[in-house]
Structure formats: C-alpha cells, structure tokens
Image (spheres, helix red, strand yellow):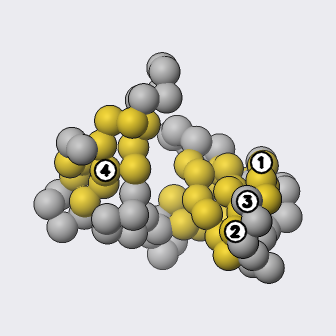
C-alpha cells in the first residue's frame, strides 16, 4: 500500500466548482473536496492522504470541530 486512507465513495455532493466526497473507511468517515470534473463515481474506491494545514477533525458524537491534523507536529492540534 502507498499509505493514506482508503474507502469506497458513498456520497458525492456538488458544491459548484468542487465536490464534497464522503468515504466510509475502516475507521471514521472521511470527507474530502475534489475539483470540478474530477469527481469519483459513487461505489468507486479512493485513497486519500491528509495535507498539513488542510485537515480538520470533528468529534463523532456531535460533529463539533475539535482540531486540525498537523503531521509535522505529530498529531492533533487544538484550534
């Protein structure tokens, strides 16, 4: 494997110039934005890699934003 997070696309939501893609994974659901014209088909498999400074983490129970992922600092940074 090349690293990253793999999941099967369950939802593709058009946001205009981009799309919000939901990937159920072996852990929590992951949502990513992709550029218009690059949207995957529902049911296809995607592998994504978090980008420093561009990853937000939400609490599963209530959806509250709790931090951002900073790989250079080695984990979750509070916002």
The residue indicated by pointer 2 is 18
Front position among marks 2 and 1: 2
Q: Is residue 61 visible?
A: yes
Front position among marks 4 and 1: 4
The residue indicated by pointer 1 is 10
The residue indicated by pointer 4 is 68
Quick one: quadrant of the C terminus? top left
Q: Residue at x 80, y 79 (%)?
A: 37
Residue 45, position as x, y percentages in the image: 73, 63
Front position among marks 4 and 3: 3
Front position among marks 2 and 4: 2
Choose the circle earlier in sequence order: 2 or 4: 2
Q: Are marks 4 and 3 in contact (CB under 8 Å)?
A: no
Considering every residue shown, the one lying at the far left of the view is 73
Front position among marks 1 and 3: 3
Between the residue at mark 1 and the residue at mark 3, the CA separation in whole angstroms equals 16 Å
């Amino acid at each position: 494997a090349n690293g990253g997070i793999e999941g099967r696309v369950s939802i593709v939501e058009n946001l205009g110039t981009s799309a919000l893609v939901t990937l159920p994974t072996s852990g929590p659901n992951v949502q990513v934005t992709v550029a218009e014209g690059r949207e995957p088909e529902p049911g296809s498999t995607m592998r994504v890699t978090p980008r420093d400074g561009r990853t937000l983490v939400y609490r599963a129970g209530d959806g509250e934003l709790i931090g951002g992922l900073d790989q250079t600092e080695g984990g979750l940074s509070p916002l």
